[in-house]
C-alpha cells in the first residue's frame, strides 16, 4: 500500500534536514570561497591599519576561465556519442545524437551564459550544479491591429497559426474615437529542453553521497510565482491552496548577500501585490524511496510546496549535472581551484598588509620629544608645518625621530617565494613571473617550455575532469530526456546542413567519449599536430595507400579550421559524407574538364589549319612565280590536304567522345557528345 501524504512528507523532511543546502559546514566553506574570489575583508582587520586583500583566488579562477571557455564554449566538439557496433543504423544514430544534443546544449541563445556559470561555479565552489529538464509551458502573446477590415483580419489570424500555437482569438476591441483597434490573443505551447544553473544554497543532496545515482535524495528548492506555476500546467485551484513564501529559502546562507553585494544586497522588499505575482516556495525532489512499500526503493519525482504534493511519480533519472574542478575518491563533492589558491591569498594578504603598514610608518615616523616642544604641532601633521620649541636651544636637542627600517624589499622576496609555491600548486604561470630579468635570461628555453607544459597540464586535467563528470552527465541526461519525452520529428540546420531527427525512434544506448583534456585549449599545438597529419595523408595519397581516404582527410581539415577559431568548416571545405555537396563539386569539376577539352579541340584545329593554309599558299606562289608546277599537281596537293585534315578531325572526335563517355560513367550523369549505345 502506498504511503499517505503525511508519512511521505515526514520521510522527505528527514532526507532534506541535513542535505547539502541545509548543511551549515558545507555552506560556510563555500561562503568563504566566494568571499575570497570577491576579495572581501577577512573580518580580522584593525582600525587605522592596512586592509588590503590579495586577489590570488580571483587571478587563478580568471586565468583558468580563459582556457576553459575556449575549450567548452569554442567551435570544437567536446563530447561525442560512441556507437556500440559498426552497424550502419547504430553509427548513424550516434552521429545524429551527437549533432542534435550538441545543438540543444551549446547552440541556443542562452547557452553561453548558462554553461559559463556551470564552469565558473566549479572553479569557485566545491560543486557546481546544472539542472536539465523537458519543459512544456504556455505563453501568451498579444497583437494589435488598427483600422483593419474583416478580410484582412481573417488573413492575419491565419498567419499567426503554427505548429506550437494552441489558439488564436480576438480578445477585445479598443476604441479611440472612430478608430478601432483589435487585440488578438495567441496562446503558444513551448516544448523543449531547458538548462538552469542551481545555486548551491538551494541545492539538496544527501550528505557524503558517492554519486547522484546512489544518493538517497537529490533536488533543489526555488521560489516561483503563482503565474509561473500556471504556465507549468497546474490548476488554478491547486496553486491557490499553496502557502505564500515567507522566510527566504537560503536564510542560513550568506551566499546571496555576497553574490549581490555590488548591487546593494538581495531584494526582499519589493513583492508583487497581484495574485499571479505572489511567491511560493517549491521543492523539486528526486528521492530514492520505497513509496509503495514493496521492500524496494525506487527513484521518484516529487514536487511539493509546504505539505502540498504537486507531483508524485516514478522517475528513473536524476536530472542534475554536477561539476567539480578536482575529483576526490568516493565523493560527488570535490575541491575547487579557488580552494587551492585561498591559503596563498591569506598569506600574501598578511605580507602585503605588513608592507603597507611599514610604508606608512616609514613615511610618518614617531618622534621622541621633551617638554620643550608644542605637542599640538606634532599631533597634527600637515605639509610644511611648523613645530614650535619653547627654548632657544637647538631643536634637535628637544626632538629625536625614531627610525623605522624599511622592509619592503625583504617582503617582496617572501612574496616571490609564495608566488612560486602557488604556481606549483595551481599551475598558474603568471604567478611565477616574479623572476628578475637576469634570472629569466639565464633560464633555458627547454626548461621554460617544461614549466609552461606543467602549468597547462593542470588546466587540461581540470578540463578533462569537467568533461568526464558534469558535461558527460549533461549530454547523456539530455539524450535520456529526448528519447523519453520527445516523440516528434525535429528539423534543424547545423553548420548549414539540414538534420532531421526523431528522438522517440532512438533505440541504442550510447555513451559519450571526451574529446578534450589532451592539449585542451592549445590551438597552436592542435594546428601543428593536424598540419603534420595532413602532410602524412598527402604522402599516403601520392602512393595510393589504403590508409587514407577523403573522409579522414576532411576530418583533418575540419580540426584545422576549428583550431583556428572558426566554427563552420563548411564555409571552406565540402564534406565527403554529404552527397549534395559532392554532387555540386563534381559538376564543377566536370564542367572545367569539358572546357579544357573543348579548348584542346580548338587548339588542334586552328594551328593545323593555319599552318597548312600557309603551306598551300606558299606552294601556290612558288608555282605561279616559277610557272614549273602544273595546275593538276596543285589540285592534288589540295585534295591530299583536305583528306588529311578530315582524317585528323575524325580521330580527334573519337578520342573526345571516349573521354566524355568516361566522365559520364564516373559521375553518373549524361554528358553531351559522349558515345551512345
Image: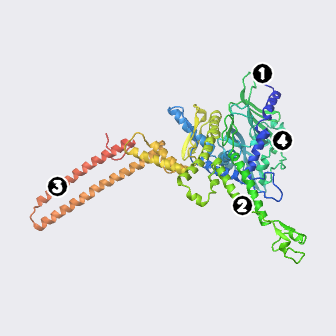
Question: Picture coordinates of residue 511 (x, y %)?
Answer: 59, 34
Q: Is residue 328 above or below residue 3?
A: below
Counting residues from the N terminus, which is met first, the one under dot 1 or under dot 3?
1
- In the picture of the structure, the residue carrying the numbered disc 4 is 245
Given residues 456 and 62, the one toward you in this image is 456
Between marks 1 and 3 in the image, the one whose residue lies nearer the viewer? 1
Of helix, strand and loop, which one carries label 2?
Answer: helix
Question: Picture coordinates of residue 517 (x, y %)?
Answer: 58, 43
| Circles 2, 3 touching at the beta carbon (< 8 Å) | no
**Can residue 245 be seen by looking at this rendering?**
yes
- In the picture of the structure, the residue carrying the numbered disc 2 is 408
Of helix, strand and loop, which one carries label 1?
Answer: loop
In the displayed structure image, the side of residue 180 where residue 86 appears, left or right? left
How many numbered circles does the render carry?
A: 4
Please give the name of the residue rendered at 61% of the width and 43% of the height, measured from the top-left corner: 461
| Quarter occupied by residue 476 | top right
Counting residues from the N terminus, which is met first, the one under dot 1 or under dot 4?
1
- In the picture of the structure, the residue carrying the numbered disc 1 is 1
Q: Is residue 488 above or below residue 274?
A: above
Tell me how far mark 2 sits from mark 1, CA to CA.
75 Å
Counting residues from the N terminus, which is met first, the one under dot 2 or under dot 1?
1
- In the picture of the structure, the residue carrying the numbered disc 3 is 639
Counting residues from the N terminus, which is met first, the one under dot 2 or under dot 4?
4
Tell me how far mark 4 sits from mark 3, CA to CA.
110 Å
Between marks 4 and 3 in the image, the one whose residue lies nearer the viewer? 4
Amino acid at each position: 500500500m502506498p504511503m499517505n501524504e503525511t508519512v511521505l512528507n515526514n520521510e522527505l523532511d528527514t532526507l532534506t534536514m541535513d542535505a547539502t543546502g541545509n548543511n551549515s559546514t558545507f555552506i560556510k566553506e563555500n561562503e568563504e570561497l566566494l568571499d575570497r574570489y570577491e576579495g572581501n575583508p577577512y573580518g580580522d582587520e584593525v582600525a587605522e591599519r592596512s586592509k588590503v586583500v590579495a586577489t590570488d583566488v580571483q587571478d587563478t579562477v580568471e586565468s583558468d576561465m580563459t582556457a576553459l571557455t575556449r575549450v567548452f564554449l569554442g567551435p570544437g566538439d567536446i563530447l561525442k556519442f560512441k556507437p556500440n557496433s559498426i552497424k550502419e543504423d547504430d553509427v548513424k544514430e550516434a552521429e545524429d545524437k551527437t549533432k542534435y544534443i550538441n545543438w540543444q546544449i551549446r547552440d541556443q541563445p542562452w547557452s553561453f551564459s548558462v554553461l559559463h556559470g556551470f564552469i565558473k561555479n566549479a572553479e569557485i565552489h566545491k560543486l557546481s550544479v546544472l539542472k536539465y529538464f523537458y519543459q512544456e509551458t504556455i505563453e501568451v502573446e498579444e497583437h494589435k491591429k488598427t483600422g483593419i477590415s474583416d478580410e484582412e483580419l481573417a488573413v492575419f489570424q491565419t498567419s499567426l497559426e503554427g505548429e506550437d500555437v494552441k489558439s488564436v482569438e480576438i480578445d477585445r476591441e479598443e476604441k479611440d474615437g472612430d478608430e478601432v483597434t483589435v487585440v488578438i490573443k495567441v496562446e503558444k505551447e513551448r516544448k523543449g529542453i531547458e538548462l538552469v544553473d542551481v545555486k548551491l544554497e538551494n541545492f539538496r543532496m544527501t550528505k557524503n553521497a558517492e554519486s547522484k545515482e546512489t544518493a538517497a535524495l537529490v533536488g533543489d528548492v526555488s521560489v516561483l510565482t503563482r503565474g509561473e506555476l500556471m504556465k507549468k500546467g497546474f490548476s488554478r485551484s491547486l496553486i491557490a491552496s499553496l502557502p505564500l513564501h515567507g522566510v527566504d529559502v537560503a536564510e542560513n546562507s550568506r551566499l546571496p548577500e555576497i553574490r549581490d553585494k555590488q548591487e546593494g544586497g538581495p531584494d526582499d522588499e519589493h513583492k508583487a501585490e497581484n495574485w499571479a505575482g505572489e511567491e511560493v516556495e517549491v521543492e523539486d525532489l528526486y528521492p530514492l524511496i520505497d513509496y509503495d512499500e514493496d521492500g524496494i526503493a525506487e527513484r521518484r519525482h516529487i514536487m511539493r510546496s509546504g505539505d502540498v504534493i504537486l507531483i508524485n511519480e516514478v522517475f528513473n533519472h536524476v536530472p542534475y549535472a554536477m561539476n567539480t574542478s578536482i575529483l576526490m575518491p568516493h565523493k560527488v563533492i570535490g575541491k575547487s581551484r579557488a580552494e587551492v589558491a585561498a591559503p596563498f591569498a591569506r598569506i600574501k594578504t598578511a605580507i602585503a598588509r605588513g608592507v603597507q603598514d611599514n610604508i606608512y610608518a616609514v613615511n610618518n615616523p614617531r618622534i621622541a620629544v621633551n617638554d620643550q616642544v608644542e605637542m599640538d604641532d606634532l599631533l597634527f601633521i600637515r605639509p610644511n608645518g611648523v613645530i614650535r620649541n619653547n627654548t632657544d636651544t637647538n631643536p634637535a636637542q628637544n626632538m629625536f625621530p625614531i627610525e623605522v627600517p624599511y622592509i619592503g624589499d625583504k617582503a617582496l622576496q617572501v612574496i616571490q617565494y609564495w608566488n612560486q609555491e602557488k604556481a606549483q600548486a595551481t599551475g598558474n604561470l603568471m604567478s611565477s613571473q616574479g623572476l628578475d630579468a637576469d634570472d629569466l635570461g639565464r633560464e633555458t628555453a627547454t626548461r621554460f617550455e617544461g614549466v609552461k607544459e606543467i602549468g597547462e597540464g593542470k588546466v587540461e586535467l581540470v578540463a578533462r575532469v569537467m568533461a568526464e563528470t558534469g558535461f558527460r552527465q549533461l549530454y547523456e541526461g539530455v539524450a535520456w530526456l529526448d528519447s523519453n519525452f520527445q516523440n516528434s520529428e525535429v528539423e534543424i540546420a547545423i553548420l548549414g546542413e539540414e538534420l532531421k531527427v526523431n528522438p522517440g525512434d532512438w533505440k541504442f544506448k550510447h555513451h559519450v567519449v571526451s574529446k578534450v583534456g589532451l592539449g585542451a585549449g592549445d590551438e597552436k599545438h592542435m594546428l601543428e599536430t593536424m598540419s603534420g597529419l595532413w602532410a602524412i595523408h598527402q604522402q599516403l595519397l601520392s602512393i595510393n595507400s589504403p590508409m587514407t581516404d577523403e573522409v579522414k582527410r576532411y576530418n583533418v581539415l575540419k580540426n584545422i579550421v576549428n583550431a583556428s577559431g572558426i566554427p563552420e568548416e563548411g564555409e571552406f571545405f565540402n564534406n565527403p559524407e554529404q552527397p549534395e555537396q559532392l554532387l555540386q563539386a563534381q559538376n564543377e569539376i566536370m564542367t572545367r574538364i569539358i572546357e579544357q577539352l573543348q579548348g584542346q579541340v580548338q587548339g588542334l584545329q586552328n594551328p593545323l589549319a593555319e599552318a597548312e593554309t600557309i603551306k598551300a599558299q606558299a606552294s601556290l606562289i612558288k608555282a605561279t612565280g616559277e610557272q614549273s608546277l602544273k595546275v593538276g599537281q596543285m589540285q592534288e596537293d589540295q585534295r591530299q590536304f583536305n583528306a588529311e585534315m578530315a582524317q585528323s578531325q575524325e580521330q580527334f572526335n573519337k578520342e573526345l567522345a571516349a573521354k566524355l563517355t568516361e566522365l559520364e560513367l564516373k559521375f553518373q550523369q549524361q554528358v553531351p557528345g559522349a558515345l551512345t549505345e
